[in-house]
Amino acid sequence: MGVTIQPSADVSDEATIGEGSSVWHLAQVREKAVLGENCIVGRGAYVGTGVTMGDNCKLQNYALVYEPAVLEDGVFVGPAVVFTNDHFPRSIDPDGRLKRGDDWEAVGVTCRQGSSIGARSVCVAPVTIGRWALVAAGSVVTKDVPDFALVAGVPARRIRWVGRAGVPLEPGDAPNTWVCPKTGETYIEDNESLTEAAK
């Protein structure tokens, strides 16, 4: 299947790109970044030093994924999304000297399996986006997002639950149950968390 890297992309020789992955025009993949199989890095996207991506991930155009972000399998990162990596960013230290790479401790964003981050969202590290969670476009995520949560706003708050198919769940017949209108799968809510019902 091979790897597709457009001539205008800047991919470090020290990066690892999995089989079937594509890196499109003007994208940059830095040293020691690891991309799994069948990943797509869109036009102008940035993958920072040492960032890890699982299989079947999509970074849409101009997404900025700064180290030390970790994306598990099947993560979607929409156009112009930004993952930050510094608690208290400064260009200079208190004496006015330019800060260097070893002057601060990088903190990352972790995206669990199947999660999706909508266009132009900002994830303020350190945060974890839970399994199959969905961040609505334009949100600012400042705290961890539970599995299957649909969050929106500034700052982002949970407004619904979603299933693996990504569509909002509907109330089930039994108390504290939710059903996916697309797949028919049932989910159980308990103390502000959602899990898949046993099959």
Image: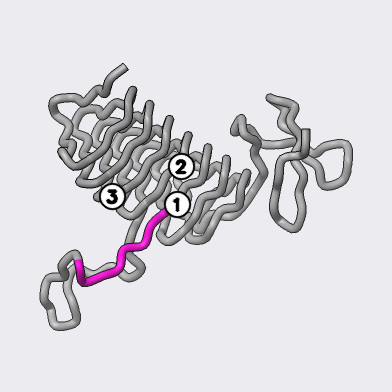
**Magenta stretch?**
102-109
Callout 1: helix, strand or loop?
strand
Is 82 left, or right, of 167 in this rendering?
left
Residue holding disc 3: 50
Q: CA distance from mark 1 to mark 2?
A: 8 Å
Residue lying farthest to the left in this orientation: 97
**Residue at 21 percent of width and 26 percent of height:** 5
Callout 3: helix, strand or loop?
loop
Q: Amino acid at mark 1?
A: Thr
| Disc 1 and disc 2 in contact, CB within 8 angstroms | yes
**Residue at 15 percent of width and 67 percent of height:** 100
Residue holding disc 2: 72
* Sequence-earlier tag: 3 or 2: 3
* Sequence-earlier tag: 1 or 2: 2
Above-or-below relation of 180 to 175: above
Q: Residue 38: which quarter of the image?
A: top left
Residue holding disc 1: 110
